[in-house]
Image (tube, rainbow, N blue to C red):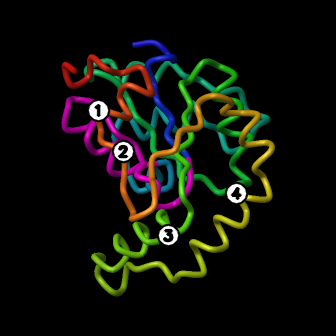
Amino acid sequence: MQIGDILILSGLPGAGKTHYAKSLERQGWARLESDKVDKRTDALAEGFKLAVPVNLDRKPNDRPLLAAASGFKGLVIEWGFRVDHLPLVEAMAARGYDAWYFDGDWRAAYQGWRARESRRPPDERQPDVNWFNQTAALERAWLRIRALYGSNVISTVLPGPTYLTESEIDRLLGLSLVRGS
């Protein structure tokens, strides 16, 4: 596995990152959620911590992450990042990681996010203000986000909400062979 074989999925909350990442996982990919990696102690999580030093003064080491992911078809990292983590994604993209941003209709994404939250146990639900704060931060950083992702910004959620299918996203990401389509 090479760095370019690792997908980083970022984007609007409720745009379908988790759904798509789980679909890749079912196809034999390894899956990491950047905001939950601290709770894991497996080789993938430890490799991620070395590849993504929160302190940008420390030199990243991608080899342990690549080694840990080598037994899988690929590695997908869900990075529904806080905007203050943008430098970390920029550094990974500069090293060749395949970074994509899931965007789309914000009202539909909010509806999808609310539906997901309503299915969680009450003590795990996030308040609506979290969605609004995160999207406001994304909007303030949009020019920087657009510069980082360029043509790798895709609209995955449409009014309704209606989401692109996994196969449609595969094609946009250049992964048409993942599902044999």
Q: Is residue 143 left or right of residue 61?
A: right
Q: Secondary structure at mark 2?
A: loop
Percent across and percent down for residue 41 are 37, 46
Q: What's the residue at 60%, 36% (across, down)?
A: 52
Which residue is at 60% across, 52% downward?
A: 81
Q: Is residue 176 visible?
A: yes
Image mark count: 4
Residue to which mark 3 is pinned: 110
Tell me which numbered mark, 4 or 1, is placed earlier along the sequence: 4
Which residue in the structure is indicated by mark 2? 164
Crowd around label 2: few <14 · some 14–19 · many ≥20 (10 Å): some
Circle 1 sits on which residue? 167
Lateral position of residue 156 relative to residue 61, left or right: left
Q: Which residue type carries mark 4?
A: Leu
Which residue is under mark 4?
138
Q: Earlier in the sequence, mark 3 or mark 1?
A: 3
Q: Earlier in the sequence, mark 2 or mark 3?
A: 3
Q: Are marks 2 and 3 in contact (CB under 8 Å)?
A: no
In the picture, the quarter occupied by the C terminus is: top left
> Mark 3–mark 1 contact, CB under 8 Å?
no
Q: Secondary structure at mark 1?
A: helix
Residue 65 seen: no
Determine the CA span between mark 3 and mark 1: 23 Å
